[in-house]
Amino acid sequence: MNHFLTSHWSIELASDQPTAQFAAHELRRALQRMGGPVLPITAAAAGPRIALRHGPDGDGFVRMADERGLVLIGEGSRGLLYAVYSLLEALGWRWAGPGPADEYLPRYAQLRFPAATVAEQPAFARRGLVIGHDLFLAQAEAWIAWAARARLNTIFIHTIGASGMPLGACRWRYWQQRRPRLWPLIAERGLRLEIGGHHLRDAVPRRLFRQQPDLFRHDGRRRVADGNPCPTNPATQALVRDWARRLFAAEPNASVYHLWPEDRLGGGWCICPHCRALSPSDQSLILVNTMAVALAEHNPAAHIAYLAYHDTFAPPQHIVPAANVEVVIAPRQRSYATGIGDAANPVNGPLAGQIAALRATFPAGASVFEYYLDGILFKSTLPPLGPTIAADLCTYHEWGLDGVHVLLTGDRPWLAVGPNPHSFAALAWQPQREPAALRGEYAATRAPATAALLDTAYAALETAWRHTLAITPADLRRQHDGHRHDPVTHPPRDILDSYDAPPPHCEQRLTALHEALDALPAGEAALAAAQHTAVAEQAALTADAAEWSASALLLRFFAARQEAAVVQARRAPPARQRQALAAARTAYADLLNWAARHVPPSAHAGHRLLRTLLALHLDQLERRIAPPWRNAQRRWQRWRELALLLARLWWQWQR
């Protein structure tokens, strides 16, 4: 049969299932945008047609040609939608991210359908986008549409209640405001909804401490109102169970609920006589099981998640998970220079056994919560991580994990999302794909005329970050939450803040950062050539170049900060130490100048707050050589700066 599209064709769909109907209308709209006619949608076509069919459930699909046209069959209605998007991809439509600039839509004088038979199954049953900040919840319509096109099947709204700081999560109140608009978009695409975050503190409010201190943890000396509640106290369990019931009733559409403990590296659990013998993992699971009872009564089909994260990463030893409790594994304490399954990596290697043990402990299901789009972990940037994502997802598939989720968060909206979203979505469907080819697809979508140059720029940045992300166990040991009462003197440190690790680690880190900087000039030259060559693609290239330069400036700051730390470790003369610190201050000022040009006013306070942490690291180095009056002056300035930023953020959150 001739497979050229004409006005005699139609779209045949007998099902009235909403996602199947959405698939038919999405196909009709896309074909029209590509230059085709407006096709009728009918239950029984008389002439040539694109037949849409689906079974009861599943994401797999088949596309084949027959004597009357094309047949698209999905295992379920969502699988049918993916079959439609696969056909549109075969016709040349590309979507590398959530906005119009991330989309390439060809136009044809005449459309010809592919005749080859295609059958596809996803590697992971669950493939999720975690929306983890108000900034991205405000853009959620575009992200939801992209997620479905990219064959992700889960939208996870990562929230926090009124008692927490929404620096890496969406305010619960804001989700409730956006929900009437967003839930229909999620539902019509057949996507699953997961909801929650570090909410355990909402179940046992701090205001109860004065009247009922036994609800709260014992720190070895007394009851304290920080950290997590006392899990073995029946009164605590009753409060948690009742609070969970109210939340389940308020959010009836979720398939998995995430009601996690405090977000801290460790030390937030109870050591009263009843809890002392229980590990953090056991204590956490006690409360998860308590909420699981309420969930089973409310919605027997739904699950609740135990979070394996920081000090709860080790499997529970004494408590058995309830039948509706699954595990979500968040391996944040890792190196992103190589895949998580790299046995030779001293940071990643030991994680294999722990993850296998977690998978065996939770038969109800296991998924991983990854950080490839985490602008907080990566200091307000998104380093290209294609090879790492590919290696990770191959390994997670080999380990038998059911799902993979990626956290989208940060302190500012992205000017360009970079290759990571496209790479993650494609590899979550088929982990064996070539990461360099996926990076090239991103470049070709953003800037078709200069795709090779843009790809070269991202390849250079990928190399630079690979050197930067090669952390060691010694680097991890420098991590801490910061002194709760004095963040100026003890600023928080993340995995990229191990600048003053003891020798020889600090010198090795400086060498790695210099190697990272050596990779940047080739990328800068490629970007300049692309911007000089292309005219029609200037808007997209300008955005990618701005994000690229943010990464480059950050890497230069890291190198300058490391240089100052190494000079101090070598006990260089004070004049040399001051010179190195001055260079680091200049690199920090370059970051602020970039922000003044590119960070919108609505995000400025949050971005500046996280940038100020980098300034506090430099203050810590300077404190060792500066006179007392200078330290006192700097300390007062930083407290004032932090207070003003927090006040601005509080005002924004209240509004």
Image (tube, rainbow, N blue to C red):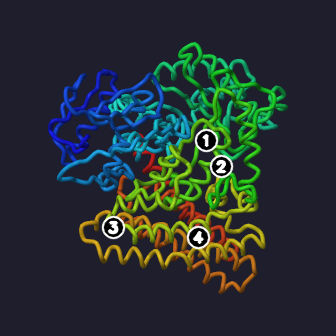
* Left or right of residue 578, residue 361 in this image: right
Q: In the rendered structure, find residue 558 and report the number of the disc placed on it.
A: 4
| Residue 288 x/y as whole percent | 66, 26
Reading the image, the residue beneath label 3 is 542
Measure the C-alpha gap from mark 4 to mark 3: 24 Å
Q: Which badge, 2 or 3, comes first in the chain's sequence?
A: 2
**Nearer-the-camera pick, 212 or 610:** 610
| Residue 83 x/y as whole percent | 38, 37
* Helix, strand or loop at mark 2: loop
Task: Tell me the crowding category of disc 2: few under 14, some 14 to 19, or many 20 or more residues within 10 angstroms, Cα based.
Answer: few
Residue at horizontal 32 percent and vertical 21 percent from the top: 15
| Residue 523 x/y as whole percent | 46, 74
Reading the image, the residue beneath label 1 is 368
Reading the image, the residue beneath label 2 is 484
Residue at horizontal 56 percent and vertical 41 percent from the top: 404
The extreme top residue here reads 297
Q: In the rendered structure, find residue 1 and report the number of the disc placed on it.
A: none
Q: Amino acid at mark 4?
A: Phe
Q: Amino acid at mark 1?
A: Val
Residue at horizontal 46 percent and vertical 49 percent from the top: 647
